Amino acid sequence: MKKEMRAVEEEVPLVVGLSALRPLSSFSSKQCSTASLFQRKFFPESSQSDWTSWKWQIQNSITDSKKLSEMFALTKDELDALNSGEVTLPFRITPYYASLLYGRESDYALRKTMIPLSDEFFTSFGESGDPLCEEHMSPVPNVVHRYPDRVLFLATEFCSSYCRYCTRHRVVGNKNELHRFSSKSWENGINYIASHPEIRDVLISGGDPLTMPDARIDYLLSRLRSIPHVEIIRIGTKVPAVLPQRITPKLVRMLKKYHPLFISIHFTHPDEMTLETSVACRALADAGIPLGSQTVLLKGVNDDSKVLTDLYHRLLMVRVRPYYLYQCDPVQGSSHFRTSVETGLRIIEQIRGFTSGYAVPTYVIDAPGGGGKIPILPDYYQGRDDNYVYLKNFEGKKYRYPDPVRTPSL
């Protein structure tokens, strides 16, 4: 009986009973009441234990326009996109994440990232299905070896919620011959890593690897950790933002067996920083897992320095370090999400120096054609002469640093 009780407790998400951890001023009571109203209205048969179960959240995810129309007043453009059959990326959103959108207008930031528009049907200049050329850098299925000492390991095609700007449209949510996420494909990938001693860092992504069952995650991590030259393992996920119920005590205890383990979390907007998400992040940090955020710069969603500064401050409060701010990849049908590069540079200029250095991510472009991540910085270096380097600070003021040119001794 005690064993059964313990098993049940380990599957209960950490947010249950931990509300005392939150600074009360950080979380809106309106947000909590909206989620409760949303559950009662659209899932009246569900209990609180259902709502806090990650498996229930996945099983009851919204995947069609009929159910979505009951929850939101969809625009004609949204309905046309959902019903057209032309959308290449499937639609899916967890009830939890849908509750964050409930009662908002059609131009609400997070709604834009989840509900398709007809803009997705158009391929604009420079766009392609695989802009980062991952397929050309894949020595075995589902492994991408772009950098000398590290690889990307695609573990699954499934996400609990699909972001409309996803760079892996060609993979996620679709079953195809090229990307079969089977035991055989995993073994081929693990064997490739084991046979290449230069690989010291493995990033597990997908899809979202934390949507897999505990046993499957455990197996993959144990196999990778058993390879002597693999020093660190990283997991890329959006689960704490869209499915925080997944972060259970059992999962956390299993993950901490495989240190050094790092987790990069995809965050988009400060409204994702709910009580549930904050508790999930704190639990992972308490397990000794370094957490970083990766945010895609999106037009009309987060292309504002105040919005991003708010997000980054909230992330630091739950021990997530802002890591990358990505220029949106030119994947097919994404032009309505992409800002100009100048917009990104301006935002970094408006953040750097005006807040903690820990709150300033590196702005990068993942170069089309497989060039990898290239940092893009505002022009702080202004040039030099024989004696000084000339600099511009965050306020636009000019300074000089003594750095005389050394004449080679004869």
Image (tube, helix red, strand yellow):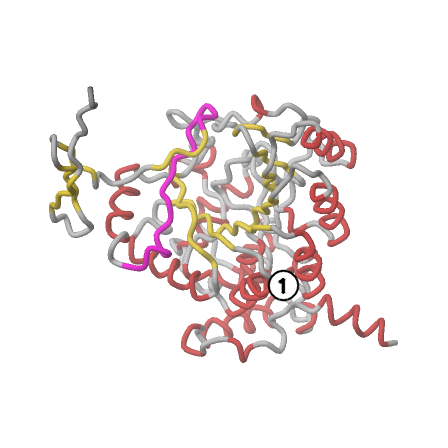
* Residue indicated by mark 1: 245
Q: Is residue 190 above or below residue 304?
A: above
| Residue 164 in the figure: left or right of residue 222 | left
Q: Position of residue 162 (x, y in %)?
A: 56, 46
Q: Is residue 6 visible?
A: yes
Quick one: label 1, few (<14), some, or many (20+) residues within 10 Å? many
Question: Which of the 4 image quadrants contains residue 388?
Answer: top left
Of helix, strand and loop, which one carries label 1? Answer: helix
Q: Does 34 lie within the magenta span?
A: no
Question: Which of the 4 image quadrants contains residue 358?
Answer: bottom left
Q: Amino acid at mark 1?
A: Gln
Q: How many marks?
A: 1
Q: Is residue 211 above or below residue 71?
A: above
Q: Which residues are magenta?
A: 355-371
Q: Position of residue 213 (x, y in %)?
A: 73, 52
**Which image quarter is the C terminus in?**
top left
Q: Is residue 45 visible?
A: no
Q: Position of residue 248 (x, y in %)?
A: 67, 64
Question: Which of the 4 image quadrants contains residue 168?
Answer: top right
Q: Position of residue 333 (x, y in %)?
A: 45, 33
Q: Is residue 62 above or below residue 385?
A: below
